[in-house]
Image (tube, rainbow, N blue to C red):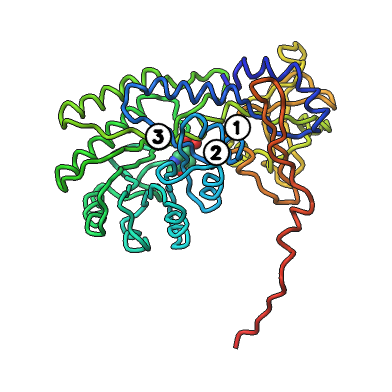
Amino acid sequence: MPMSQSFKDRLFPVVDQIAEHYGTPFHIYDEVGIRETGEKLKQVFSGIDGFREYYAVKALPNPKILALMFDMGFGADCSSIPELILSRQLGAKGEDIMFTSNNTDPVEFAAAAAEGGCVLNLDDISLIDKVPEFPELICFRYNPGPRRTGNVIIGNPVEAKYGVTHDQVIEAYRKAQEKGAKRFGLHTMVASNELDYTYMVETARMVLEIAELVEAELGIRFEFVNIGGGFGIPYKPEQNALDIETMATEIAAQFDAFKSKHGYAPRMYMESGRFMTGPHGCLVTTAINQKETYRKYVGLDACMSSLMRPALYEAYHHIDVVGKEGQEKTEIYDVVGSLCENNDKFAVQRELPQIDEGDLVVIHDSGAHGHAMGFQYNGRLRPKELLLKADGSVELIRRAETVDDYFATLKFDADEMAPK
Ligand SMILES: *Cc1c(COP(=O)(O)O)cnc(C)c1O
């Protein structure tokens, strides 16, 4: 299922009032759903000592959402300076933050080390000498290359730009030891939006094997292994949810086996973004136009500046027309925005209830990589964000962009030069 029945049951009866109060379009997020998912993760992984989720901030970088994550005891996975600032503003410090950047600029290393530092996760062996002050605790991102097959979104590991190779991994930790590192972690991320739980079990097996290999060579005892993000969500109604119970049981068994063999086991970290927030948000829009040419079109008051995934990945996002679920009269529509790009379509040739202008059209699963991926191309601005709170009240948690925001970067001090 896309958006949960529970979210729907709490949102749809009042969505017209919310739309009237705030105006469309908006993303609205479900506090109850986010908390339930977070608590569920903690519960299923409670068999692994020191389990911690580092929420991947990029999925939905809103302070109110991040505050929910910290309230559940989660850390933050950041990969840019603004994400670090956002996390620290909300009180995350030190080992509450994993900094997993790639193609990193020295300025970013400095920011990561500032204000009490964080867990530095290095993407490449060549970066070791570029870290200004080498930290005591260091992690590397491991890329298994041909040892694993990738999934659709992240692609084949051999073609992925991330991480150190299998042949580099021992050398990476050896160099880190020479630089004075005393505490170690190991990270990988080899999937995105994966719904097959066995893939994650294999990933856990893989990182534990690498931890064992590095320990045998260098005598390093890993404090943690991080299996990354990539937990999938069912965007299509016919898809099944990821079986996290079975996954957690099988992963815990591997940690137990490691412990029996070595007398200790590393802690397990993960960095879910999409799984935490994806299904717990939707984009609420109004149908503003209808057009019948070679196809039937419904035009919404939002476009791909609010949700890029359909245009970017041809991703399916389920659509409901409020008050018309299950209606017998249907049409085949292309559901479009106003951007001057023909891929600005939320759905292509989708069977939907017959839509009238003024209908509220809800696009599911916009809680991750939705607003955050937005942009201003073509002068199409990003919409507001709302939070549906546990007590049923609604709060504005980000205003819509304005024309002033669009022009903000055109206000600057004059700066001209004449090259000699
Ligand atoms: C994007 C990202 C994640 C989160 O991925 P999801 O697919 O949203 O779970 C985690 N770790 C890193 C390093 C990432 O880049």
- Secondary structure under tag 1 reads loop
Q: Is mark 2 within 8 Å of ligand 1?
A: yes
Q: Which residue is mark 3?
A: 270
User: What residue type is disc 1 on?
Assistant: Gly
**Alpha carbon of mark 2 to alpha carbon of mark 1: how far?**
8 Å
**Alpha carbon of mark 1 to alpha carbon of mark 3: how far?**
19 Å
133 shown above or below 47? below
Give percent across and percent down for residue 189: 39, 40
User: What residue type is disc 3 on?
Assistant: Met
The answer to whether the residues at label 2 and label 1 have Cβ atoms under 8 Å apart is yes
- Secondary structure under tag 3 reads strand
Q: Residue at x 66, y 48 (%)?
A: 375
The foreground one among 376 and 115 is 115
User: What residue type is disc 2 on?
Assistant: Ala
| Precedes in sequence: disc 2 or disc 3 | 2
The foreground one among 274 and 97 is 97
| Precedes in sequence: disc 1 or disc 3 | 3
- Which of the numbered marks, if any, corresponds to residue 189? none
